């Protein structure tokens, strides 16, 4: 066993329904990396492993929602194997999008009422329950609050989503012109 | 090293990209410009340098356009308005699903060797299981004379697999549909037994809530 194999194991582990990989502290502790340049050394290990596994279709990524490093399958492979968890469930996808929009405005949580308002639907309880079951949100029934779990940070490529939205916007703008 | 001059070819390629960008066929943000500059660099030498200046200029213009698009994109990033603007256009659920469509990535995890899975499987499987009887065909013995016990011509497994092959195309379907058109109750019972065994060996699966049989 060497550092790379331990790193691979830590980055590929599932911690809970919505957490994969390991934090920087955990990586340093398990790998027993100490000293002044410990972060630099860890980053070098991550970069080395990343370039090593790239031809296999994997990337090492960082989830800003919970500060975990994890292994991700690259976009081409993901598209090929249809990783869209909402394919054929547009209503659920739309509810998640509205939840995401509300939560982004409000540092990761929002009131259920706000989502209902944005979604323009009387009842979203079934959709919200299903999203909670899938591990994307946590529902606080007492305070009527919804909180995003880190799972969305692992599975949704936010950059790609913003790019899609920008392209859609320019498409709409050009139609107006 | 050869003295290949691909400047005209590259210029034509850049012009095609420009046209596609103007007509909205492609977005510069989605296009990799590295290969163009790489080809320029690799095929450039002192003998063709004069032909390459125009190509290089066009490639640089393309790059600067890409930066411009990126700048516009980044300008949109400073607020959450881009999400709201999209929702204000009253998109249908299907349109929203499409916007999210190519944004999903799969996280890789080694569930099969994770400690959590080992713990779960230990709880799940570390139990005494009853011995499962193996079904074997009884060998027919030559005993001479007549014998009342009839042994079927085909082995049970063969008959079961024949039945499985005959229903494979129907799947997935409701459990009752597998017996459609069969009047003979003995046959119904026989097929029912095959289904039970196919379920046991895992070739068929049954969803209790919908009574659907599937592979």
Image (tube, rainbow, N blue to C red):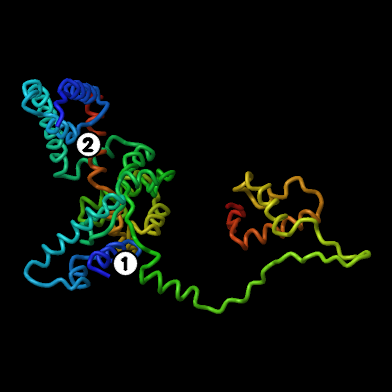
Q: Position of residue A118 (x, y in %)?
A: 30, 45
Helix, strand or loop status at disc 1: strand
Picture quarter containing residue A39? Answer: bottom left
**Count of picture labels:** 2
A167 relative to B125 in the view: left or right: left
Q: Position of residue A148 (x, y in %)?
A: 28, 57
Mark 1 Cα within 10 Å, few/some/many (few <14, many 20+)? some
Picture residue at 21% right of the left edge, 24% below the top: B13
Q: Position of residue B195 (x, y in %)?
A: 67, 57
**Residue with the most extreme front position:** B1
Q: Is residue A92 in view?
A: no
**Residue with the most extreme right position:** B145
Q: Which residue is mark 2?
A: A166
A50 relative to A94 in the view: left or right: left
The numbered disc on residue B18 is none
Q: Are marks 1 and 2 in contact (CB under 8 Å)?
A: no
Helix, strand or loop status at disc 2: helix
Picture quarter containing residue B37? Answer: top left
> Of B127 and B8, which appears nearest the observer?
B8
Q: CA distance from mark 1 to mark 2?
A: 34 Å
Q: Is residue B87 in view?
A: yes
Label 2 chain ID: A
Vertical side of B81 occupied by B48: above or below: above
Asked whether the residues under marks 1 and 2 belong to the same chain, the reply is yes
Vertical side of B140 occupied by A107: above or below: above
> Of B56 and A142, which appears nearest the observer?
B56
| Label 1 or label 2, whichever comes before in sequence order | 1
Q: Position of residue B175 (x, y in %)?
A: 66, 52
Label 1 chain ID: A
> Of A94 and B163, which appears nearest the observer?
B163
The numbered disc on residue A15 is 1
């Amino acid at each position: 066993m060497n550092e790379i194999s331990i790193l691979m194991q830590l980055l590929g582990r599932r911690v809970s329904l919505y957490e994969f990989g390991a934090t920087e502290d955990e990586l340093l502790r398990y790998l027993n990396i100490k000293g002044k340049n410990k972060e630099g050394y860890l980053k070098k290990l991550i970069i080395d492993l990343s370039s090593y596994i790239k031809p296999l279709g994997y990337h090492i990524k960082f989830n800003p929602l919970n500060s975990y490093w994890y292994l991700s399958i690259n976009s081409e492979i993901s598209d090929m194997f249809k990783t869209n968890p909402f394919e054929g469930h547009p209503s659920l996808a739309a509810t998640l999008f509205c939840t995401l929009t509300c939560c982004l405005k409000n540092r990761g949580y929002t009131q259920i009422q706000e989502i209902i308002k944005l979604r323009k639907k009387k009842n979203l309880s079934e959709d919200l329950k299903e999203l909670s079951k899938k591990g994307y949100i946590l529902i606080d029934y007492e305070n009527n609050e919804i909180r995003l779990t880190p799972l969305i940070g692992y599975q949704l490529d936010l950059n790609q989503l913003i790019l899609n939205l920008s392209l859609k916007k320019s498409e709409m703008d050009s139609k107006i012109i | 090293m050869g003295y290949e001059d691909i400047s005209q070819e590259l210029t034509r390629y850049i012009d095609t990209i420009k046209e596609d960008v103007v007509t909205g066929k492609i977005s510069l943000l989605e296009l990799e410009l590295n290969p163009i500059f790489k080809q320029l660099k690799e095929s450039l030498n002192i003998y063709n340098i004069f032909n390459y200046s125009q190509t290089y200029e066009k490639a640089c213009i393309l790059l600067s356009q890409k930066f411009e698009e990126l700048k516009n994109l980044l300008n949109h990033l400073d607020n959450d308005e881009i999400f709201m603007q999209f929702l204000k256009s009253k998109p249908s659920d299907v349109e929203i699903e499409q916007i999210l469509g190519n944004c999903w990535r799969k996280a890789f995890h080694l569930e099969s060797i994770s400690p959590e899975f080992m713990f779960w499987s230990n709880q799940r499987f570390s139990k005494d299981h009853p011995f499962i009887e193996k079904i074997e065909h009884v060998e027919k013995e030559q005993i001479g004379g007549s014998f009342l016990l009839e042994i079927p011509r085909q082995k049970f497994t063969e008959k079961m697999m024949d039945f499985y092959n005959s229903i494979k195309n129907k799947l997935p379907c409701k459990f009752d549909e597998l017996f459609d058109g069969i009047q003979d109750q003995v046959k119904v019972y026989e097929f029912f037994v095959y289904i039970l065994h196919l379920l046991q060996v895992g070739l068929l699966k049954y969803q209790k809530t919908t009574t659907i049989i599937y592979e």
